[in-house]
């Protein structure tokens, strides 16, 4: 539901453009992840990750592409920081590759891996760019997957050792820590659907993985605070507004179940509400992996919620007449604007979730940690006039401004992505970047959206 239909004042805000002034301390940034940009997959003592293994399986990735080189950021990080500074970024969200730090997941530390991130952090700070570290963006050490991966509770314990070591070294310089990026995707696409590494298709593994990801988060929060006493600690989830296909009770209940499965399954435990009982009952989920004290650990208070937002879901019940409420996703409405990923452009959903996180869940601070769109950029255009991306970002920034006007404690916004990169199962066929990357030559070129974003950052306004 679009909240603006209920509040006339907010409807009027839709028509405002020139007066959309963001606070002077608003954090404008861009985001990446290690496997998607670093390359250097087997250099300087780095161990294998599940994505190194998965991407080398024939047919796993479009055109059999891999992240072996990606954007070669491992060797070109200084050039990339210069580009960030050219855009005027106030912050940069990136992830640490766990197998660079512990090649086997635990045990012997790889000092060369830590040295790389120390150089990167120091380079960012020298450029007056605030580092936001994500400790886990999907690249589990393969050795831990060989022992069961996230469905194995011991993997959560191994993550705590990893988080402890990284924060001991970088905690004196890094003020913002994100434990996990999109744990739902890790569990769902990795262990149930099989589209992402490690490519499994097992419901029980999915449920166990999701729980252990949350448990690892909860165990790590006090460790991060101990090692970086002045830091802010949070987690990033991906959120989708769920719209019922009709006003029929069956569709509305199916949408509620989908919201519980897709959004509240990981969100509610973080605020001490436990797993949604209606979802457990409807899908008959076994929850025997929960041990005494787990839910209390998971609900350890955090300083901010990281929100990734891209689109919405439209849901109908499988069989209205026979009361089969199984949620069935529908395609976007006819005439909708669609990105190259096939996702409906639905900017008002950003406002819906920002207000929901504030007034239903009471998080003290929120960052949009990812938002962006893939469009078919034309490399023959010397400036790469990606006007669709500018329009997309502008409409979403406007919804963020709307949220600020009604009291949402939104502190910053990270565009996905800083540069074109390895887009997981899509390989290099989907471009989200503000910066165009020629993956054959590694040439970087700022798109028109990067120049537009520079103006937004400098002025704090959208015109």
Image (spheres, rainbow, N blue to C red):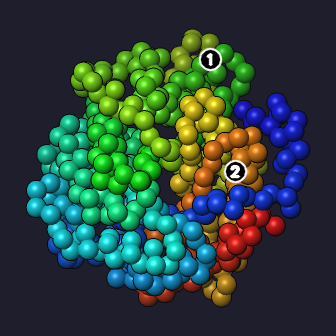
* Disc 1 element: helix
Q: Give the quadrant of the N terminus.
A: top right
Percent x, y for residue 102? 18, 61
Image quarter of residue 284: top left
Residue that numbered label 1 is attached to: 250
Looking at this rendering, what residue extends furthest in the front direction? Answer: 229
Q: Is residue 32 visible?
A: no
| Picture quadrant where residue 27 is located | bottom right
Query: Which residue lies under the disc numbered 2?
Result: 400
Label 1 to label 2, Cα distance in Å? 32 Å
**Left of 435 or right of it: where is 233?**
left
Q: Is residue 317 above or below residue 47?
A: above
In the image, what residue occupies the spot 45% across and 65% down?
131
Label 1 packing within 10 angstroms: few (<14), some (14-19), many (20+): many
- Taking depth in this image into account, of 248 and 447 the one nearest to the observer is 447
Q: Position of residue 212 (x, y in %)?
A: 28, 37
Front residue of 84/131: it is: 131
Residue 438 % position (x, y): 49, 82
**In percent of the image, x 55 and y 37: which residue is there?**
363
Residue 60 left/right relative to 325 = left
The image shows residue 333 at horizontal and vertical percentages of 71, 42
Query: Element at badge 2?
Result: helix
Tag 2 or tag 1, which sits nearer the N-term? 1
Q: What is the number of the mark on residue 131?
A: none
**Looking at the image, which residue sits at the far top?**
322
């Amino acid at each position: 539901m679009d909240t603006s239909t209920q509040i006339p004042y907010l409807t009027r805000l839709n028509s405002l453009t020139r007066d959309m002034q963001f606070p002077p301390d608003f954090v404008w940034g861009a985001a990446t992840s290690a496997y998607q940009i670093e390359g250097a997959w087997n250099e300087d003592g780095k161990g294998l990750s599940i994505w190194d293994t998965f991407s080398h399986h024939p047919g796993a990735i479009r055109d059999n592409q891999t992240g072996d080189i990606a954007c070669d950021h491992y060797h070109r990080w200084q050039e990339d920081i210069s580009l960030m500074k050219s855009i005027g970024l106030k912050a940069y969200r990136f992830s640490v590759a766990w197998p660079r730090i512990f090649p086997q997941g635990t045990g012997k530390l790889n000092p060369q891996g830590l040295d790389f991130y120390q150089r990167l952090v120091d380079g960012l700070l020298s450029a007056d760019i605030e580092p936001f570290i994500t400790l886990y963006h999907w690249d589990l050490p393969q050795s831990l997957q060989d022992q069961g991966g996230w469905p194995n509770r011991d993997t959560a314990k191994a993550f705590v050792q990893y988080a402890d070591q990284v924060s001991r070294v970088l905690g004196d310089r890094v003020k913002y820590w994100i434990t996990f990026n999109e744990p739902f995707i890790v569990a769902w696409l990795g262990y149930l659907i099989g589209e992402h590494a490690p490519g499994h298709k097992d419901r029980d593994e999915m449920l166990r993985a999701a729980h252990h990801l949350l448990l690892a988060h909860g165990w790590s929060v006090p460790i991060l605070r101990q090692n970086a006493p002045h830091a802010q600690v949070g987690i990033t989830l991906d959120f989708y507004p769920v719209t019922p296909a009709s006003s029929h009770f069956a569709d509305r209940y199916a949408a509620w179940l989908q919201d519980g499965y897709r959004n509240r399954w990981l969100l509610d435990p973080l605020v001490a509400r436990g797993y949604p009982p209606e979802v457990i009952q409807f899908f008959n989920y076994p929850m025997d992996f929960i041990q005494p004290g787990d839910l209390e650990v998971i609900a350890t208070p955090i300083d901010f919620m990281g929100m990734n937002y891209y689109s919405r879901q439209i849901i109908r019940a499988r069989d209205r007449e026979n009361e089969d409420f199984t949620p069935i996703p529908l395609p976007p409405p006819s005439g909708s604007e669609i990105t190259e990923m096939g996702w409906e452009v639905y900017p008002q959903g950003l406002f819906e979730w920002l207000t929901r996180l504030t007034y239903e869940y009471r998080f003290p601070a929120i960052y949009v940690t990812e938002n962006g769109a893939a469009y078919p950029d034309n490399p023959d255009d010397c400036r790469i006039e990606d006007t669709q991306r500018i329009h997309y970002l502008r409409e979403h920034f406007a919804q963020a401004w709307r949220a600020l006007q009604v009291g949402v404690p939104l502190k910053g916004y990270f565009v996905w992505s800083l540069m074109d990169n390895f887009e997981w199962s899509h390989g290099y066929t989907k471009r989200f970047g503000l910066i165009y990357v020629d993956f054959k030559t590694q040439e970087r070129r700022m798109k028109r959206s990067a120049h537009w974003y520079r103006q937004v950052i400098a002025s704090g306004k959208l015109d």
